[in-house]
Structures are given as C-alpha cells and as structure tokens.
Amino acid sequence: MSRVVILGCGPAGLAAAAAAVSTGHEAIIISNTDKPSTQYGAQYLHAPVPGYEDVTKVRVTYSLNGTPEEYRKKVYGGLWTGKVSPEDFAGDHDAWDIRETYARLWANLISDLRAGLIQRQIKNGGIPFIRSLRPDLIVSTIPAKALCQNPGHQFRSHVIYADGSTSAATMPDNTVICDGTEENAWYRISSVFGYRTTEWPARRAPTHSGAVQVVKPLWTDCNCHPEVLRAGRYGAWEKARLVHEVYPAVREALDPFRGEAGTDPDVIRGIERVTGETHEGGGRWRM
Ligand SMILES: Cc1cc2nc3c(=O)[nH]c(=O)nc-3n(C[C@H](O)[C@H](O)[C@H](O)COP(=O)(O)OP(=O)(O)OC[C@H]3O[C@@H](n4cnc5c(N)ncnc54)[C@H](O)[C@@H]3O)c2cc1C
C-alpha cells in the first residue's frame, strides 16, 4: 500500500484523499485547521467527484454581455491575455453541488477515519516534516507560496471584490451572467444552488460593507519541490483550476503504484508508527 500525504483539507484536499482511499492507498492530510473550509457564494462542481455522482445536480445557464476581449480587459486590465471563463463556459452546462459533495467527503473520510488529519501549519517550504511521514506521493492544495524556498519566485495574482450574499440584479437561480461592458460596475453575477455571488474589478470596487477583497491566483514560476503534485487553484497557483480536476489528477499520479494498493488501510496505526505520537481521538493529531 502506498501512502499519500495531502496538504489542505478544503474541497480540493478531500477530493485528493478520496482518489487515494478509493484506490486502496493510505491518505494522511496535513492542514492548519481540523475544520472544514467555508464555501462562499455560488460555487459548484463542473463534474462530480467519482463515488459522489448522486449529489444534487442542476443545469446552469452561463452568458456573456459584450465580447470576451471586453471582459478580459474589464476584469484583468493588462494583467492577463489568456482565456477567460465565458470563453470556456458560455452556454448551458451541468453543475454538481460542491457543498453537499464536500460535506459527504468530510463525513466519509475524516469523521469515519478513512483518512488521518494532522493539524499543522506548513511554511517556508515545510518539506522535512512532510518527508518524516515517508510519503510515496505528496499532493499540495495549500497556497503554493508555503512550499516555496526561493524568494525570487513570483506568485502573480489579481484582486477583485466579491459579495457572496447580495446580488446586483434580480436573476433566476442557476444562472451566471458575465459582463464586459462599462455599463455595469460588476463583471459577473452568479446564482447557483440558491447561493449568490457578485464580483467587481478592483478599479470599480463597490463601497457597501458586504463586499470583500479576494485574491485570485494567476500563475507562478515556482518550481521548488517538483515531486509534489500541486492540485486545486491555490496549490497550483494557477487561474481557472477547478475542484473537479483534482480527483483524476491524483488517480493518474497514483497509476505507478497500482499494484501496491491494499484493501484496508489502517491510517491511524500507520501514522502512529511513523510519528511515534498517539492520536487525540477522531483520527486527528496536533503537531
Ligand atoms: C469567487 C470564487 C468562485 C469560485 N468558484 C468556483 C467554482 O464554481 N468551482 C470550482 O471548482 N472552483 C471555484 N473557485 C476556485 C476554488 O476551487 C474554490 O474556491 C474551492 O472551494 C477552493 O478549495 P480548495 O480546497 O482549493 O481551497 P481551500 O478551501 O481554501 O482549502 C485550503 C486548505 O489548506 C489549508 N491551508 C492553507 N494554508 C495552509 C498552510 N500554510 N499549512 C497548512 N494548511 C494550510 C486551509 O486551512 C484549508 O484547509 C472559485 C474561487 C473564487 C474565489
């Protein structure tokens, strides 16, 4: 059986753990919290996490006012010249409930002790501690900078403002409207599974108190620890990464270990053996 150490216990981290456990490998998660991440606003999965295909599914209508060029300029100024989301998603597509999936992943993996959870902050490259767990594969979903050991590496991002509860326009549920025009200050309003988000470019930041600044990753040239599989938007520090992409990426990385999969991973005893620590209960450790 191979051991997969996963950094971060958000939806991306648990999707990675599901990929490991469902193929008979051992999953140990290291995260600075032992609580689930809060999901703000209208987020959804573009494909189900395998094993969780029966979560609530809806059809989302995704549209763009103006052209992709106008949208790119409105949202990013000159910071980004690549593709923007309406170029990928305009039209109708299926959406799976990310909250329901994440709650079920948490119950199956963390509450039912199929994955171990060590509470610890990773910083300044933090690899020696991770290595002490003797992983066969490391998957990182925590912000990529935490694994960086070269101050010259760049982590480019752009700042937007988002309001996860107030809509800027009346709209039907399961609808996303992108706007590249100068007519509206916002560039995207979304209503999916009853949750709403309005997003504004920084130069047209709203003044009401509900809107918060959000840092969105664009790209990084960090190549520290090339052996680590960087997954999820923050782990990869890359624009447009989505949660549903994590499971297949981890499955693929585990392909070389296929013959080593076991059927009953004893995660608790495995971690105790390696760390010499007795768990506090619930498969969780503080280190
Ligand atoms: C406005 C907006 C809308 C989005 N919409 C979608 C969408 O519809 N669909 C989609 O797939 N994605 C979407 N995303 C992107 C992103 O995939 C989601 O936000 C997703 O919920 C993030 O999950 P995650 O597990 O990658 O990160 P998080 O939920 O942030 O989890 C990171 C984990 O790492 C831990 N951690 C952080 N730093 C450290 C450290 N130094 N050491 C140890 N642990 C650490 C945290 O405590 C947490 O457990 C959206 C993003 C934004 C901003």
Image (cartoon, rainbow, N blue to C red):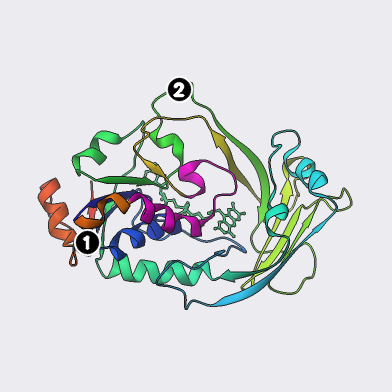
Instruction: Residue at 10%, 51% (x, y): give it.
Output: 273
Magenta residues, as a range?
A: 232-253
On the rendered structure, is 261 left or right of 159?
A: left
On the rendered structure, is 191 left or right of 6?
A: right
Looking at the image, which is closer to me, 16 or 268? Answer: 16
Instruction: Find out whether residue 239 is within the magenta segment.
Output: yes
Q: Residues within 10 Å of mark 1 (few under 14, many from 20)?
A: many
The residue wearing badge 2 is 151
On the rendered structure, is 144 left or right of 19?
A: right
Which numbered disc covers residue 283?
1
In primary-sequence order, the first of circles 2 and 1 is: 2
Residue 53 vertical position relative to residue 230 in the rendered view, above or below? below
Instruction: Residue at 49%, 45% (x, y): give it.
Output: 234
Q: Is residue 209 visible?
A: no
Amino acid type, label 2: Pro
Name the quadrant containing residue 210: bottom right
Q: From this viewpoint, which residue is outermost toward the top?
A: 152
- Whole-percent x, y for residue 229 in the image: 39, 43
- Whole-percent x, y for residue 19 in the image: 35, 60
Amino acid type, label 1: Gly
Instruction: Find out whether residue 248 is within the magenta segment.
Output: yes
Number of residue marks: 2
